[in-house]
Amino acid sequence: MQQILDWYRSLNTRERLFIQGGGIVLVLAALYFFALAPFYKAVDASATRVAKKDADLAWMRSVAPQVTSRSTGPRPTDESLIRMIARTTQECGVGSALTAQTPRGETGMAVRLEGAEFDKLLVCLGNWQQSYAVVVQEANFDRTSKSGVVNASLTLNRSGG
């Protein structure tokens, strides 16, 4: 350490100022890369996360009237499960994705939807449960190459009859 101090003292004033300036630049760079940059990165990540949650909240608020406008209990209906599913998938906007319906006993149905918008399908599933006492016993969702679109295989059961 003493050798470094002796060397520093042996420099002329201009060289000392140059070394001091370099030291200040080095300290500032270290402060930025080890303290400020990670902080800014964390703030950006938090802002992105908040923006996504705001978008989710906006979507939930947009579908809330559809969910709350439904009756609180299932409607009694004599409509067959096949017809009810075909009609309500059209109402929900996923009717064109309905590719197969296969009866499973007296109150069950296997349903296949291909290329269905996931958000609309979820609204449809909620409608079936709340309005028609149709519950999902099994559900398999497969991603498609298009964002927000899925292929779904559902096993449904009408619990109310």
Image: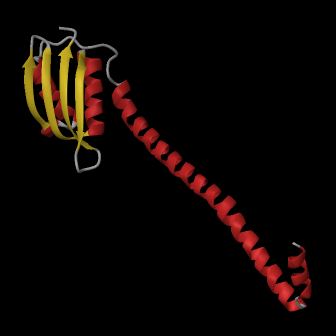
Q: Residue at x 24, y 35 (%)?
A: 141
Name, please, the residue furthest toward the top.
Answer: 161
Q: Quadrant of residue 155?
A: top left
Q: Would residue 36 be found to the left or right of residue 84 on screen?
A: right
Q: Which one is nearer the viewer's eye here, 143 or 28?
A: 28
Placement of 37 over or under 117, stated as above or below: below
Give how far across and how far down residue 153 sits, in percent: 18, 31
Q: Residue at x 9, y 27 (%)?
A: 101
Q: Residue at x 24, y 14 (%)?
A: 75
Give how far across and how far down residue 88 sits, in percent: 18, 28
Placement of 112 over or under 38, stated as above or below: above
Q: Residue at x 24, y 15 (%)?
A: 133
Name, please, the residue furthest toward the front.
Answer: 3
Q: Which one is nearer the viewer's eye here, 29 or 94?
A: 29
Q: Quadrant of residue 4?
A: bottom right
State the quadrant of the N terminus. bottom right
Q: Would residue 9 be found to the left or right of residue 155 on screen?
A: right
Give how far across and how far down residue 126 sits, in percent: 30, 25
Placement of 49 over or under 110, stated as above or below: below
Q: Which one is nearer the viewer's eye here, 68 or 44?
A: 44
Q: Would residue 109 be found to the left or right of residue 16 on screen?
A: left
Q: Which one is nearer the viewer's eye here, 29 or 93?
A: 29
Give how far across and how far down residue 51 sits, in percent: 50, 48
Q: Quadrant of residue 2?
A: bottom right
Placement of 149 over or under 26, stated as above or below: above
State the quadrant of the C terminus. top left
